[in-house]
Image (cartoon, rainbow, N blue to C red):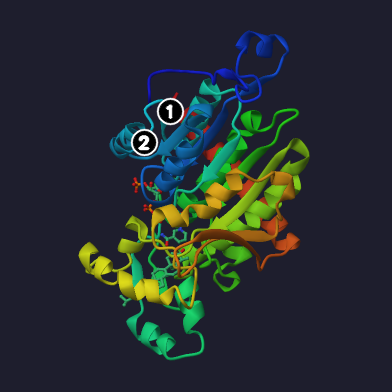
Amino acid sequence: MTPQRRKPVPEPDSQLFPQCRHCVSTLGLIKMRKVVLVTGANSGIGLALCQRLLSLHAESLHLCLACRNMQRAQAARSDLLASHPAANVDLLQMDTSSISSVLIAAKEVKARYDHLDYLYLNAGIMPNPKFDVKAFFKGLFSSNVVTMFATGEGILTQTDGVTPDGLQQVFVTNLFGHFLLVRELEPVLYHPNRTSQLVWTSSSNAYRSAFNLEDIQHQKGTQPYSSSKYATDLLSLALNQHYNKQGLYSSVICPGFVMTNLTYGILPSFPAFLWTLLMPVFWLIRAFTNTFTLTPYNGSEALFWLFRQKPESLDPFAKYHSLTSVLGNNYTQPQKMDITLETSESLYMKLLQLERKMRDKLSENENSTC
Ligand SMILES: NC(=O)C1=CN([C@@H]2O[C@H](COP(=O)(O)OP(=O)(O)OC[C@H]3O[C@@H](n4cnc5c(N)ncnc54)[C@H](OP(=O)(O)O)[C@@H]3O)[C@@H](O)[C@H]2O)C=CC1
Ligand SMILES: CC(C)CCC[C@@H](C)[C@H]1CC[C@H]2C3=C(CC[C@]12C)[C@@]1(C)CCC(=O)[C@@H](C)[C@@H]1CC3
């Protein structure tokens, strides 16, 4: 963690009143710096988002990179400061797969900042992916080919693990750790007269068929990634139902297919240079599906777009897709999600139950070690 404990500095709106800062503050026209926390910010889409945010708002932002590995986090911070020396970039150690790590990190956030404007819930894993070559070639010659390239449907499975807390690794990393973080940060996310936004990096690989309300952690299946992303879509809707009155809004995005550490892991025997050699093929595929955003910069388009939207104007049933045209132009498009209010509410209740169980377990452990 960075040693300094800084509250964001109130800043007068210098565009409105360029000459007299004193008058601005005495008139009470003070505008606080926007505080933005991004999980999984040290690489890929998360890091690209940070770069883009700083390109537009370097001095009016307070950026907090929440990462599990502080060495990688430091490297990302140095990268950002190299291109934006005046930026405010803090680091926060947080492993979303560990309950105690999330609770400690949330406490630290509440001590450092008195409000959070944006919380990007982006960290995610797809462990031990298995690429079904046979299904891929079968798909290539079927009418489903475009969907296969856009969503990875039917060609990927994963082997999940269990964390020391006894939770399924993918479920807790991608979803539950983030849920707990949101719950813990309620005091800095709710504030009168202004709104806050939660933005989840979901996926078009989120399938209803991979999700089961009776097995929300996906202990039994072989598609924990797809299940965790479908659960993300459901949870975002439930959060809107429960939090909008308090000025807190939630949205989900899909970055498209992006070349990152996560995707390199899908074909581990495939060296990075072969992926680069395949780029012309991928650009060609863009002619059929604009979901091939390919670079983290392009993939972060919808995350960046949401930063500039009024949250009240967003559709809680829509997933916002980053898309890139054949000519390389980026844009964001909403698409209705395959979710219902009933299922989202049932999942929300189950997550609250699991949260209570985990908290009880944690305090039992603390008492027994006292
Ligand atoms: N790439 C793609 O095509 C797509 C990606 N996505 C989603 O985008 C998000 C970002 O992934 P992407 O940029 O592609 O991949 P990266 O692997 O580059 O980024 C994932 C980030 O999450 C972090 N992370 C992983 N596990 C944890 C953990 N337990 N605690 C804290 N941080 C963690 C990683 O940290 P570390 O460096 O330490 O591993 C890394 O910073 C993910 O949610 C992914 O599911 C969705 C659709 C498509
Ligand atoms: C080596 C071959 C010539 C080409 C192989 C291509 C596949 C490995 C990709 C084609 C579509 C991709 C895809 C994803 C992973 C890699 C592919 C299957 C995702 C499932 C990655 C994670 C996501 O969240 C999805 C949105 C991606 C959808 C497309």
- Residue at figure coordinates x 41%, y 86% from the top left: 140
Q: Quadrant of the N terminus?
A: top left
Q: Toward which corner of the image does residue 358 lie, by quadrant?
A: top right
Which residue is tagged 2?
80
Q: Quick one: quadrant of the C terminus?
A: top left
Residue 124 higher or lower than 198, as above or below? below
- Residue type at mark 2: give it: Leu
- List the residue tagged with mark 1: 87
Whether 169 is drawn above or below 39: the answer is below
Q: Residues within 10 Å of mark 2 (few under 14, many from 20)?
A: many
Q: Residue 116 in the image: x percent, y percent?
A: 59, 31
Mark 2 or mark 1: name the one nearer the start of the chain. Answer: 2
Residue placed most toward the observer, 341 or 257: 257
- Give me the residue at 47% from left, 69% from top: 223
Q: Is residue 191 left or right of residue 143?
A: right
Disc 2 and disc 1: Cα gap in Å? 8 Å
Q: Is residue 113 left or right of residue 47?
A: right
Q: Tag 2's secondary structure?
A: helix
Indicate the position of residue 4 as horizontal and vertical percent values: 41, 18
SS category of the residue bearing label 1:
loop
Is mark 2 in CB contact (under 8 Å) with mark 1?
yes
Whether residue 232 is visible here, answered yes or no, is: yes
Q: Give, as a three-letter code, the residue at label 1.
A: Ala
The relative height of residue 102 versus residue 340 in the rendered view (above or below) is above
